[in-house]
Each structure stands twice: as structure tokens, then as C-alpha cells.
Image (tube, rainbow, N blue to C red):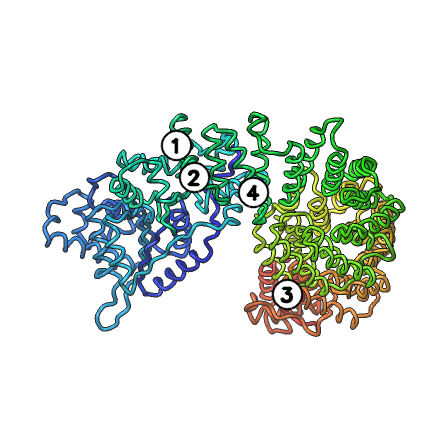
Amino acid sequence: MPLTSFSSPLIGRDDELSRLAGVLERARGGAARGVLIGGDAGVGKTRLLDEVTQGAARDGMTVLTGHCVDLGDVGLPYLPFTEILGVLAADERFAGVLAAHPVVDRLLGGGTDDVRDMGGRLRLFEGIAGLLADLSDVAPVLLVLEDLHWADQSSRDLLRFLLSRGILQRPAGGAPTHRLAVFASYRADDLHRRHPLRPLLAELVRLPAVERLELRPLADTEVAQLVQALWDRPLPDATVRRIVERAEGNAFYAEELVAATDTEVGGVPSGLADVLLIRFEQLSDTAQLVLRTAAVAGRRVEHDLLREAVGLPEDELESALREAIGRQLLVPGDGDTYSFRHALAREAVYADLLPGERARLHGAFARLLTERGHRAETAAERAHHYRESHDLAEALAASLEAADHAQRVGAPAEELRHLETALDLWSAVEMSARPSGDRVTLTLRASAAAAHAGESHRAVSLTRAALAGIDQDADSELAARVRYTLAGNLISVDNLTSAFAYSSEALALIPAEPPSRTWVWAAATHVMAARHVGENETALRVAHEALRVAEQLGAADARADLLISLAGLEGAGRRTPEGRERLDQARQLAHDSGNASVELRALFNLAIGSYESGDLEEALPYLSEGIDRARRAGLLSSLYPQAMRHLQLLVLYTLGRWDEALRAANGAGMLPAIDGYAAGPALYVALARGDFTAVDRARALLRGPFDWMATLVAAIALTEAASLRGDAEAAVEQVRSSVKALTDDAGTRPDVAVRLAALALSAVADTTAGLRLNGDEAGAMRWAAPADELVELARYTAARGDDGNPQGPEGQAWLARAEAEWARAVSGPDVAAWAKAVAAFDFGDTYEHARCQLRYAEALLAADRREEAAVQAGAAREAALRLGATLLLEQTDTLIRRGRLSAAPTAPDGPSPLTAREQDVLRLLALGRSNRQIGEELFISGKTASVHVSNILAKLGAASRTEAVAVAYREGLIAPE
């Protein structure tokens, strides 16, 4: 069974839990309160109440729960209260209280005849109120009534009495009320206009001691967390996104959709469909007809369009709509429209249609929309209705119109969807009925939309399909375009050798003379591909030639693209002021030409150049500008904006602005643990703060097709996790596999290899230090070879960045740490090496600077330079506190205690576990006194002193007198004398 359990975790209800906990706290103090908890079916009311009642029971409250049941028009009177009294009667603890209120026996014994008159009802109501008051004198009481929308009239009347007169209202004279809280839940979506609970709720919420709590739908990120928590292994990203979209914040719907993941190809799971159709089937035949027609229209439908499609007189239509709205299946919206309250309800009604009925209604909507004119904003609707009514020629034309509209408004994902629909329809439509153009060009356009939407692998597939569709006698310019487009898409998925092969073919297919934009762009793509496979001389030669042609043609955007490539090929690259000046020129050219994609490439390179040169603050404005430009162009999901989002978070992380980085990641509109570009800093922070669930999230990034950035992020997180756990073997193996995966076709190792090597060396050094401490010098020597391998990897990588030049400040800092960790692994702490590492990370990496300060303090302490060690340890501790880096804080405090680097031991949190006499005994124990000597000094017998020593050992969890003294020093219970 894939589901972990249907006792789902409570996610996204922290505010509601806090509010209800506050009500219970006040109730325990004598301030009786009532809370009416509303929300749609399945939103999580019962789950919330379960959590609250369990907590209340743990806190010593008497929890009484009664359930209302749907028994139709004729319900059992007082049903939830009868349930509560039955529970009380079965518990011997409450026998005395029940005996004091014999009137309630009438409900338990079924003798309700004498409570039907007004006097009898009043005595019953007062008896129930008195019983609850007396119970609250014994212990605080939480009374829970679930599903109040099904309550019978008698139960509603009793609740009205209890809340307005019986138990919540403050008595005359200002005396305290009872230690009692009443929580009552109801379905908000069941309360149609004439529902009898509506007036009662309106009356009760006006009472000063009663409040209303509406449960909102869960946020998308919260539903995603719930979905992943329900499954015993990570679900594919696409599956999670689809469930989140369809559940629309409803926890029950999400659970049902997850449960059907292995069995449902599409549509609504059968069990959930049955639940959703219950309310629909309670409508009149006319109202059902209107809803079936509305379901074909989609989630939302205009009144006029619905009227024409359903073909009913206006008064009958309005009556049916009023019924559907009253039953909360439809909700009125702006612009004289109606929407289904929940998309899954619409799906269930739609799935219930007969095939012929469905096609007929789709055809009616298609014709009605067409008669209104070919408005661009309705093209997608028309395409959908024509396709479902099997008019494929009209569907093809409308799909292309919808794609044009999506392109104009900057919606590449929607453009791709419409273009793929058009490609599916192309061969099914007679040639004479097809729009102008050809399938290859259309496929090429779809690949561009896929790239802009961030679907890199889909872009590759589409471009390969375009290549396969080219005839041998096809136009050479089109053939070249397909090949250089395929090369560019292959670069984005790191298939670099193939990219170089196709860019070479493209350049060979079209002559440089006469000059053409196609040749310039083929050349620009070839420059990038050549650089990625290490053919720098070829890249430089072609770049300069193409730049001359681009200037001749006035192709400003192609000039910009070539300048960006040249900034990385000539001189010291983008890290230098000269390189960034060239990049800035490219940015302006691209901006003036209106080519957003090239402009984004320039901005990314400006930002990464600043980062690599150690100017972290300078990188942030470029990143903000790039992300804003991508948002305005509808390109947020494309390659460079994703990389900029990652870099922005990475800069904030490096600067120590961790909470700001986490907020930025959460506000990026992405689902947790899905997007490698945003996941990195969040994973690094989680590990530093001791949250090792980050390991599972990191591994999830490695599922699916190879993604270079996701692999890099996972490599850092998994190596760091292994290092923090002290698992040197896992850390070393992770570095080896990660470097192999990230090394490109030209054999160029990734820049991150120096960081990975340093992290793994830390674990190796910890292991050898432990072995030496235990006298196992031979065991420590066995790690010499892996340590040498790692430090050589760090040295090689730091000396040869991806542009062939030595890495910048960050890479050199990681090299300094790798050298210091290597020295610690092979011979022990090296003061000079750690001093160099501390200085190297001073460029702005707050966390790594602090981690190196801790190691520096260790080395200084080993060299008996205690005052200097105390300074470094104190600075590391201050940074760890500021960052919330709990693991570093623990390590630093351990060093400070072990090395006695603080002026005085830290006072323990809270009172000492020892008595004053035990403190005296412990002080003498620390001086090495025997039991007899302790007795003589304290004027007690040696036997009594022995008893005190035994008590001290038990309280401190120590096995010996020596360990007890060590624990006492560590916990600050005694000071050295």
C-alpha cells in the first residue's frame, strides 16, 4: 500500500491551532468560551478537532464529543447530547455528578415524553447546564459537537440555551464563569439559504463569549507537503503539481487523489466522484440539466452563454440557478458569471455525461462562441469545444489562434500547450483545410515555447521531431535553423558533444556570404557549443567573424549574444571589470533590440561575474533586475531566470541572510523539493540547523532526466549531510559520483568540485582524529590515500575554472579549507592553514567563515594559545547564534567547555538539580576527597557522604565519581578551584 496512512499529518493549521489553544487556556482559567468552526467538507475540521482534543486530554481536560448524523428530515432528538451522556454514564468517575442531576436520565432512558412541554424542556436544559458546570468544577471541560449542519431542532435549541444562558455567560456580580469550552463544527458549503442552522449561527456569533473560526483552504505549498507526507516515497513532481491543482486546498480531496495515483489514469477517482455527486443528485431535473450544461462550458460560464446553450426560458433558468447556488454547487461571480464551487465537482458532473450528450453540448458552445466573433481571448475555449465536438479543422485553426494570443501576453506554457494540440491535429485535418505554413516550422515554434517555459527536455524532443520531419530537398536555411536550435536546446540539458555536432552541421549548411541573420545565429550557437567542449580557438575565431557580420547586418541582439560569449573567452573573463563592461554593453544592445532572452543571459553573466569575484552585494541588483525583466516577458521558467533565482538565494545564503533567503524561496511560487534552482540554499540552511529531512529532499532532485543544476545542489547537500554525520566513506563516495556526473563531455570538472572535496575532507579529518585519539594510528593512516585524492581534486579544480583561469575568491577559499582539512587528516591541526582559511572566507561567506574560525580555535587550543582560541571560538559562537546554525553552535559550545575557554562556566538553564548539601559534597568530590574526608569536612558520617555521592551520580547520569565531576563542569554546576 503506497499510502503511509490515512491518519494524515496536520499541515498548515498552525494559526488555527494557536487560536484554539488560547481559548482552551482561558477556559482552564475560568473564562468559558465557545467557538463555531466552519469550513467546506473535507477541508480538515475533524482533523483539526482531533489534534485539539488530544492536546486538551493531555492537559487534563475532560473531553466530551457528540456527533450529529444526517438522518433526513426526521432526526433523533438530542442525538449528540445523548451520545455524550452515554459516555459519562459508562465512566465510574462521573457517577456522583450524574446522580446529582437526575433530569438527564430522561435522555439516557429514552423517557422524553415529559420534556416536550415547555416546563420539561427548560428543566432538561437547566439540568444539562448544571451537569456541565459541576463537571467543570472537577476538571476543565471541552465539549465538542461535530457536524452541526445535521443537528436536529432539539439539539440546536439546547445549544442555543447553553451558549446564551446556561454555561458561557458571566453570572450577575461579575463572578467567574465555568472552566469550560464549547467547540462546534459545521459545513459551510452545506448551509443553503434556508438551512435552519444559518439563523442560529447569526444569533450565536453576536454573543460576547462566542467566536467564529473559518477554516480556509490549504495553500498550494501546504497541499504539496500533505501529498508527499501521505506517500511512502517521493512522488514525481508532475504528479504532485497535478494533485495540488485539482485539490484546490481541500485536504480530503488531496488524500483521495493520492490514493488513486496508482489506479487512475485521469478523471475523478470513483469514490470521490460518488461523494461529489451526492449533492448534485438532490437537485431537481431542471437544475441538473443546467449544471450538466455548465460543466461542459468549463469551471466558469457567462449567464447569456449558458442560457443560449441550455435553451430554457429565463424564469426556469433563474429558478434552476437559484437552486444550484442555494445548494452551494455554483457560486455567482463578477461579470454576470457562475462558477462551480470546486473544480472537482465540475469534473464529476462532466464525467457523468453520456458521450453523445457531451459532444452535442461542446458543439453548441463552439458555435455560440464563434457567432460572437473571433476574439483572441476566446480562442482557447473555441479550440477546446471544437476538438471535443470532433470538428478538427476548426479546432486546429482556433488552437493556432490561441497560441498566438498566449505568445503576445507572455504565457509560454500555454502557448506550448496550444501548439502541441495543433501538432496533434495537423495530420488529422485535410491539407486543403489546414492553415498556411508547414509542420516543421510549427514544431520548431513549439520547441521555442517549451524552452521559454522551462521544459528543456521537451524542447529537445520537439526539435528532434522537427529535424526528423525535414525532407532531403528542404530549404537549407530551414535545415540550418532546426540544427542550431537543436544545438542550443542540447546545451541547456548538458548534452554538449551532440550540441557541438549539430551546431557544426548548421554552420556548414548555410554560407557566410551573402550575410544573413540565420548564419549569424548559427555561428553564435556554434560559439557557445565550441566553448563548452573546450574548442576555444574555434569559438574565438567564429565569434569575431560573426560579430563583424552582425554589425554589418545591424543585428543588435546577435551582437549582444556574441559579446557575452567573448566576455567569457577573452582575458580573465566575466570576473574582471573589463569583462563586466563588455557584458553591460551586451545587455544594453539586447534591451534596445527587444530580445529578452539575450538580455537575461547578459544579466545572469553580470551577476555571476560579480559573485565569482567576491562582490556579493554587487550581484544582487543584477539579479533583481533580471528576475523582474523575466517576469515582464513571461520567461520566469526559462533557463537563465531559473539560474538567477538560484543565484539570488545563494547570495543571500552566503551573506548570512538565511531567513530572507528562505522567505524568497517560499515566495517564488514553487512547490517544495521540486525545483533544483531554488532548493539549494533551503537545503543548506536545513542541514546547518539540524534538519536531516533535507537528505530526502536532496535525493528527490536526482529523480527523472539528468538536470545539471539539480545534480549540483544535491551533490552539495548530500556531501554536507554525510560530513555532518561523520560518515567519511559516504562523503568520499558522494564526491566521486557527483564529480563524475557533473564533468562535461570535454572532461572539464565542475567548479563545485573544490567545495565538495573540502566538505568530504572534513569528514575524513574527523575520522582520523577519532582514530588517533583511540591510539589507532594504523587506522588513521588508511585514510591518507583518500585524503590525498580529495586535496588533489581541490587543487586541480581551483587552478582551472570553467573559463580556464584560476577560480575566484570563493574557489580559493574552499581550496584553503581543503588544504587545512587535509593537514588535519594527515598530521593534525595546523594553525597557519586554518588562519589562511579564515582569512580566505572573509570575502563575505558568513557561515563558512565561522566554521573555519571553530577549526582555527581548535588548532590554537592544541598549540596552547588559549586566549587566541577563546577569541576565535567566541566569534564562531556569535555567528552561529545569529544564523540559527544549531549544529555549529553545539560544536562551538562543546569546544568552549572542553577547552575551558570561557571566563566562567555558563550557568545552567533553570535551577540546579542538586540540593545545597549535594552541591557542597560535589565541590569536595571535585577536589578528589574520599567519602570519609568529605564527612569529616562537612561534619557528617562517611556513610551519609556516600549516600550523597550516590544521589549525585544518579541525578547527573554519571557512572563514576570522575564522570560526575566532568558533567558538573560541563553543565556549569561548579566552578574550577
Q: Earlier in the sequence, mark 2 or mark 1?
A: 1
Disc 1 or disc 3, which is closer to the eye? 1
Between 627 and 860, the one lying in front of the other is 627
Marks 3 and 4 close (CB-CB < 8 Å): no
Q: Amino acid at mark 2?
A: Leu
Marks 1 and 3 close (CB-CB < 8 Å): no
Between 572 and 823, the one lying in front of the other is 572
Residue, disc 2? 369
Q: Amino acid at mark 4?
A: Glu
Residue, disc 3? 971
- Position of residue 63 measured from the top left corner of the image (x, y, whole percent): 34, 52
Q: Residue at x 44, y 44 (%)?
A: 251
Disc 3 or disc 2, which is closer to the eye? 2
Disc 1/disc 3 C-alpha distance (Å) = 77 Å
Disc 4 or disc 2, which is closer to the eye? 2
Looking at the rendered structure, which numbered label has been put on residue 361? 1
Disc 2 or disc 1, which is closer to the eye? 2
Q: Earlier in the sequence, mark 1 or mark 4?
A: 1
Number of residue marks: 4
Marks 4 and 2 close (CB-CB < 8 Å): no
Disc 1/disc 4 C-alpha distance (Å) = 25 Å
Mark 3 Cα-neighbour bin, 10 Å: few <14, some 14–19, many ≥20:
some
